[in-house]
Amino acid sequence: MFNHILVALDGSDCSHKALDVAVLLAKEQGARCTVCTVVDVVRAAASMTFATGDIVNEWIAALNEDGRQIESEAIAKYADSGVTIETQVLEGYPPSALLDVAKNTSADLIVMGSHGRTGLKRLWLGSVAESVVQEAMIPILIVR
């Protein structure tokens, strides 16, 4: 049924649970996985309003390295799973970047974790999962 599963990984426990589910599903379906971590550079740069350009660039480079580390540690866990797993670390607005990857890689399912925030926390922090659900043209599996 599924040939290519895109998994959003941000280093949180819920995103690691989503990866667990995605790998299990991929194994059952004979699908491959693309694990994607998105570094939100706009949010990162905005939090450093008074920093110099060099400091902001160093901070963004560090965030990208953190993203690569998150992915490599997660992928190592599944090295013997029999599932083909590719990784991508991107910069951008997470919902848009995830949807672009899904389209560009011909993914037919997106699996992502949800922090389960509600009320003011959700309003303040936003919801990547909700944004992806609203815009995606393929099925989404949300893991809590």
Image (cartoon, rainbow, N blue to C red):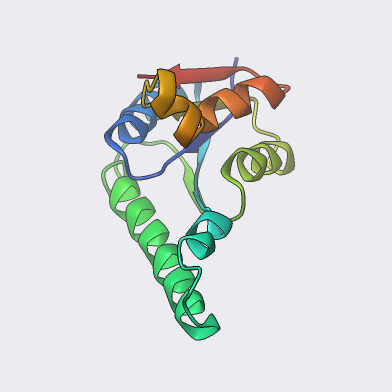
> Which residue occupies 52% across, 54% down?
43
Which of the 4 image quarters holds residue 100?
A: top right
**Considering only vertical position in the picture, is 31 above or below 66?**
above
Q: Position of residue 97 (x, y in %)?
A: 64, 45
Left or right: residue 27 versus residue 90 is left
Q: Position of residue 28 (x, y in %)?
A: 43, 18
> Which residue occupies 61% across, 48% down?
93
The quadrant the N terminus occupies is top right
**Considering only vertical position in the picture, is 40 above or below 142?**
below
Q: Residue furthest top?
A: 1
> Which residue occupies 52% across, 27% down?
129
> Which residue occupies 42% across, 41% down?
9
Q: Is residue 6 visible?
A: yes
Q: Is residue 28 visible?
A: no
Between 72 and 133, the one lying in front of the other is 133
Between 74 and 28, the one lying in front of the other is 74
Q: Position of residue 112 (x, y in %)?
A: 46, 29
Q: Position of residue 115 (x, y in %)?
A: 36, 27
The quadrant the C terminus occupies is top left
**Considering only vertical position in the picture, is 75 above or below 109?**
below
Between 50 and 85, the one lying in front of the other is 50
Left or right: residue 5 versus residue 137 is left
Question: How many numbered badges does the structure rendering display?
Answer: 0
Left or right: residue 1 versus residue 56 is right
